[in-house]
Image (cartoon, grey):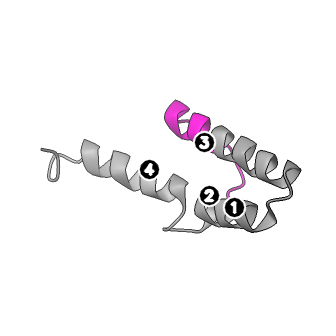
Amino acid sequence: MRNKLGRDEHHMKKSMGEHKEIARLLRKNEVDAAIDMVLKHIVRKEGSYWQTLEQDLSASDPRTAR
């Protein structure tokens, strides 16, 4: 778990959207779907933050940029 907020606006918007979706699923009592969303959101190297970060880093790396 991270102990500080990110600085990248795209990552922050994506994270907030995922938080809202988790809350929506819980309000609808869709617990299994909420658990899946939480795992997608936080699991290291498989979570959405890490996937987005890796894509951004790869895109900015002149060795891998197309």
- How many numbered dots are placed on residues in this image? 4
Could you tell me the amino acid type at mark 1? Val
Q: Is residue 21 visible?
A: yes
- SS class of the residue under badge 1? helix
Magenta segment: does it hold 13?
yes
Q: CA distance from mark 4 to mark 3?
A: 12 Å
Viewer-nearest residue: 40 or 24? 24
Please give the name of the residue rendered at 17% of the width and 53% of the height, measured from the top-left corner.
64
Could you tell me the amino acid type at mark 3? Gly
Q: Residue at label 1?
A: 38
Percent position (x, y) of residue 45? 49, 68
Percent position (x, y) of residue 55? 35, 51
Which badge, 3 or 1, comes first in the chain's sequence? Answer: 3
Magenta segment: does it hold 21?
no
Left or right of 42, for residue 27: right
The mark closer to the camera, 4 or 1, is 1
Q: CA distance from mark 3 to mark 1?
A: 18 Å
Point out the stretch of residues depicted in magenta.
Answer: 1-15
Which badge, 4 or 3, comes first in the chain's sequence? Answer: 3
Q: CA distance from mark 4 to mark 1?
A: 16 Å
- SS class of the residue under badge 4? helix
Q: Residue at label 4?
A: 52
Residue contact at pointers 1 and 2, CB within 8 angstroms: yes
Please give the name of the residue rendered at 54% of the width and 62% of the height, measured from the top-left corner.
47
Could you tell me the amino acid type at mark 2? His
Q: CA distance from mark 1 to mark 2?
A: 5 Å
Q: Residue at label 3?
A: 6
The mark closer to the camera, 4 or 3, is 4
Q: Residue at label 2?
A: 41
